[in-house]
Structures are given as structure tokens and as C-alpha cells.
Image: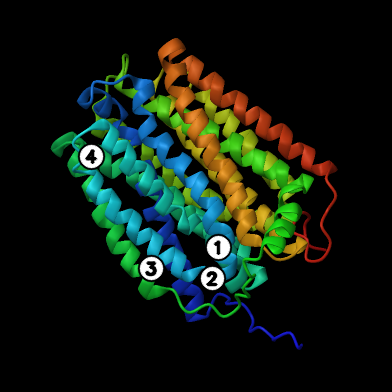
Amino acid sequence: MTTPVLPPGWAPGDPAYRRITLALFLAGLATFALVYCTQPLLPLLADAFDITPAASTLSLSVTTMAMGVALLVFGPLSDAVGRLALMRITLLIAALIAVASAFAPSWWLLLTLRAALGFAVAGLPAVATAYLREEIHPDWATSATGLYIGGTAIGGMSGRLITGLLAQDFGWRVALGGIGVMSVVIAIGLGVLLPSARRFTPTPLRHGDLLDNARRMVFDRGLLTLYAIGFCAMGAFVAAFNGLSFRLAAPPFDLAVGTASLVFVTYLIGSFSSPWAGRLASRYGFRRVVPAALTIFAAGVALTLVPDLTFVVIGVGVITFGFFAAHGTTSGWVTARAANKGRGTGLTGSLYLTFYYAGSSVCGAVAGTAWSLGGWAAVAGLAGSLVAVALLLALSMRRVQLVPAHDYDQPPP
């Protein structure tokens, strides 16, 4: 049987390239605005429902935990049925759930809706990088992935900033509803902008094929190391920002929730650092760029220990720069290495993000306890330790065997 010849991937200058990058930039924005919109509201939720700081972090942890579970479903499913329909439908469902969460009458119902939102919203990040790797020309796929990750950075900022500002004047319910409405509009735009897939080749959902893909993608030492880097980096990032919500509201800063949320403008730095690091990785190799990004991340954590608001804001900016540079390049490294090992990149991307969001769920919840026990010093210690582990793992990749053919583990010749 003759293998069909696929058309070349889209490149800059093609109208479809511009539509894809714009659509996924906006979709990344909506996805992570939906996920992280409760983070600046943690003190308000604790007061509104009479719960502890540690309990309030569950509004974020249950969302990311549900995402981790859903990623294991949507990734393999997308390998069989395609990426487009999953991205379009799941983002719209998640946005509608966000609108409904604004009317939750009890803490437990709010948590249930947040978990449902997490499951639905996983459809887009589960397949976005695999979709880009397929539809975009290989010379530009890493840069396009970096742009998508940049959209997630602005989404994280928007979710925190918009909800913080709305909550200060109108309360947390209006804040959550506002994010939901914005995301509904973006979900509709995603359906209009994305062109039909041209290079997708389905992988049937057969038991033997799934097990074979799992063996290749789970038992590869390099991929396992990259999954662990995602767990530690994301855990450190969410732990720092969960603790920051309480630190800025407490003495000596005593900032109102809307004012405190302005610190999340630093997320704009992430929208730059991710695509920039992606370009550097294409030139110099992931093995050099990822450790450098994690070193910058660690320096930012150290800066926040200075008891001065200026140093805290600068430190948060450095953290954001380092984290998004590390995450953007690590996620691109995962899909590139997986593509060189064979079919089933949707499963690999899902496994990476499952570890990534497990880090968010576990370490984000632990951050609330760390704050209650030791204040910001304990939270910074937790985040710094996780970054140190991620850095050691990244350095260990130098001893991992490269994957042949179009290898992205090393700089091009």
C-alpha cells in the first residue's frame, strides 16, 4: 500500500500560518485565564466561604488535577480522531462552565465546577503542540510552539489581573463570570480561524497500538526526565504565585486584591521569553537553553526574599521569564523527541502535561500549608528546592542518548 504524500507544513507568509498562530495564541490565553483566574482571589474565597488559606488553594488544585486526568484521555483520543474538533469543543464547554461557576452557592459546588472546568479545558493543551508539530513546517514548529506558550503566559496574566481588578470593585462572582464570557468569545473565534488539518495521520485506537505507543513514550529515559522537569518547574511556579497572593495582602504590603493583581502584569515577560527561548533552542539546542532558563528562574526566587516591594516585583518578573522560557522549550523538546521515536505524539504531550499539572496540584496545595507554617520564607524555600531539582534533571539530559533523524536535542549542523 502506497503511503500518501503529505503537503508541506505551513510557514510564515502563508495565510493559514498566521491564522493558526493567532488562533492558538488566543486559545492559550483563554485556557490559562480559565485555569488560574481564582489564584488572586484566594484571600477573598477564604473569607467568603470561611475556610483556611490551604483549603482555598483547592480552587486551583482541583482544576489542575482534573486536567491531568483528562490529558490522558484527550491525548490518545486525538491521535485517532484528530486535533481540531477536540480543541474547538472542549474550550467552548470549559468557558460555559466558568460562567456557571460564578453562580455557585457553596464552596463544594464551586470546587465541583472547577474540577469539571479542568477536565474540559484539558482538550486544548493536550493536543496543541502536537497539532503545531504536524501542521507547521519543521523549521518553524518550535517558534510557533513558543508563540502558543506565550499566549498561555498572557492568559495566566489576564486571568489573574482581570479577576483581581473586577473582584476589587464587583466581587469574586462577577470576576469569574467575566473571564468566562471572554473565553466563550475566544472559543468561537478558534472555531472560525483554524483551517482544516492537512497533515494529520490517524493512529487507530487499538489496544496493541496504544500499549506500543505507551512503551515507547513512557520508558524512554529522556522523556521521563523531561516529564519530571515539567513537574518540578510548574510546581515551583504555582507554589510561588499561590504564596504571593497571601504575601501581598499581608503586612508589610497590605495591598488590596486589585492592586496586588497588578504584579501579574509581569506575565507579559513570559509571552516574550517563551518564543525567544524557542528560537535559541532551534539554534543552540535544548540541552543548553533549558538549564539556562531554570537558572534564571532560581535567581528570581532568591530576589523575592528581599522584604521590599520593588525587589519582590522584579523577582516575580525574573521568575516568570525563567519559567516560561523553560516550559516553552521543554514542551517543544518533548514533542520533538517523541516525533523522532514514532507516531503517538498526542500521548507524549499529554504525559508531559499530566506531570506538569500534577506538579501544580500537589505543590500548589503544599504552598498554602507552607505559608501557614513559615510565611514567605517557607514558600520560597519550597519553590527554590523544586527549581534546583529541575535544574539537576536538565543537566542530566546531557548523558541521555540522542534520538536519530531530525533530532532537536542538539543544535543543527
Q: Residue at x 62, y 73 (%)?
A: 202
Label 3 amino acid? Leu
**Res 151 → quadrant:** bottom left
Q: Position of residue 334 (x, y in %)?
A: 67, 53
**Tag 1–tag 4 contact (CB < 8 Å):** no
**Tag 2–tag 1 contact (CB < 8 Å):** yes
Instruction: Name the quadrant of the C terminus.
Output: bottom right
Q: Disc 1 vs disc 4: which is toward the camera? A: 1
- Say left or right for 215 vs 238: right
- Say left or right for 394 vs 13: right
Label 4 amino acid? Leu
Q: Residue at x 22, y 48 (%)?
A: 177
Q: Which mark is residue 190?
A: 3
Q: Disc 3 vs disc 4: which is toward the camera? A: 3
Write down the residue under mark 2: 81
Write down the residue under mark 1: 77
